[in-house]
Image (spheres, grey):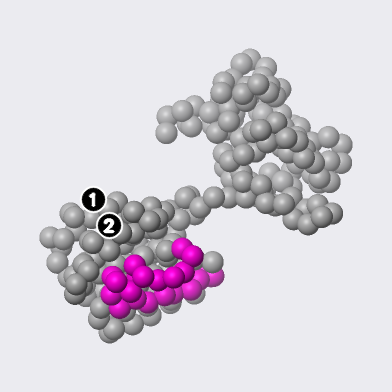
Amino acid sequence: MIHIGICDDEAAMRKALRLLLETKLQLMGEDYRVSEYDSGERLAANEETAWPDILFLDIEMKQLSGMDTARLLRKRDARTILIFVTAYPDFVFQGYEVHAFHYILKPYDERKIQNVLEQAIRELGKSREKFFVLEQKSGSLKIPMKKILAFSSDRRKVGVLLDDGEKLDFYGKLDDVEKNLPEYFIRCHNRHLVNLNHVDGLEKDCCICGTVQFPVSRAYRQGLEIAFARLLLQ
């Protein structure tokens, strides 16, 4: 679920922005909730476990300004995607200090808001930690994708090798697993999917991930080399 925050001391502006955001979120089929704050103080004092994922923050507010509120936000949680709302374009350049993602000028332009919201949701997807859910007899186990070195098939089972050397397995097919993985998992062999973020180097017939080596077959060598080169250039 995406948590959207709107912080503006003008109730009419909060209502107008909320309507536009909810309309777009519903069209996108997103699961969401929206929280409204009538001041920076109210936002800073909220007792929720986390700040909003995406925050639309008015710069000009009484007492605690939008910039001061943003500074508090960055001290407590740098992950929030911050979008400034202002009637004066001169304020836009101040956003660099607090790593603002974008800005929207008042009065609201529906298309602009939709575009910025789409960009923010895409950015949120990149920054959110992803997990692989492994079903076991004792229940479901959530494994951070970043900890997985590789998936390897062995007959009717798929093995999961973690960066600490632990190995887990489950019944399944590697082809089915591959369909639901992030793009940084790539085939190096018919039986192996490696996490490019853990690849230290490529040799003629093997892929090196720390102290582990995986075979590289001719069919997948070129695709692996291209993907690895792209990663190095990022």
Q: Position of residue 69 (x, y in %)?
A: 27, 63
Q: Nearer the viewer, residue 209 or 140?
A: 140
The residue indicated by pointer 1 is 97
- Say if 41 sits above or below 131 in the image: below
Q: Amino acid at mark 1?
A: Glu
Indicate the quadrant where residue 120 lies.
bottom left
Query: Is 40 colored magenta in this rendering?
Result: yes
Q: Nearer the viewer, residue 22 or 138?
A: 138
Please tell me which residue is depicted at 36% across the width and 70% down the height of the picture: 45
Q: Position of residue 164 (x, y in %)?
A: 66, 33
Crowding at dot 2, Cα within 10 Å, few <14 / some 14-19 / many 20+, comes out as: some
Please tell me which residue is depicted at 82% across the width and 55% down the height of the picture: 138
Q: Nearer the viewer, residue 77 or 205?
A: 77
Quadrant including the C terminus: top left
Query: Is 95 colored magenta in this rendering?
Result: no
Secondary structure under the numbered disc 1 in the rendered image: helix
The residue indicated by pointer 2 is 71
Q: Residue furthest right?
A: 155
Quadrant including the N terminus: bottom right
CB atoms at circles 2 and 1 under 8 Å apart? yes
Residue range in magenta is 28-50
Is there any visible trace of residue 63 in the rendered image? yes
Mark 2 or 1, closer to the camera? 2
Q: Nearer the viewer, residue 101 or 113?
A: 101
- Circle nearer the N terminus (2, 1): 2
Crowding at dot 1, Cα within 10 Å, few <14 / some 14-19 / many 20+, comes out as: few
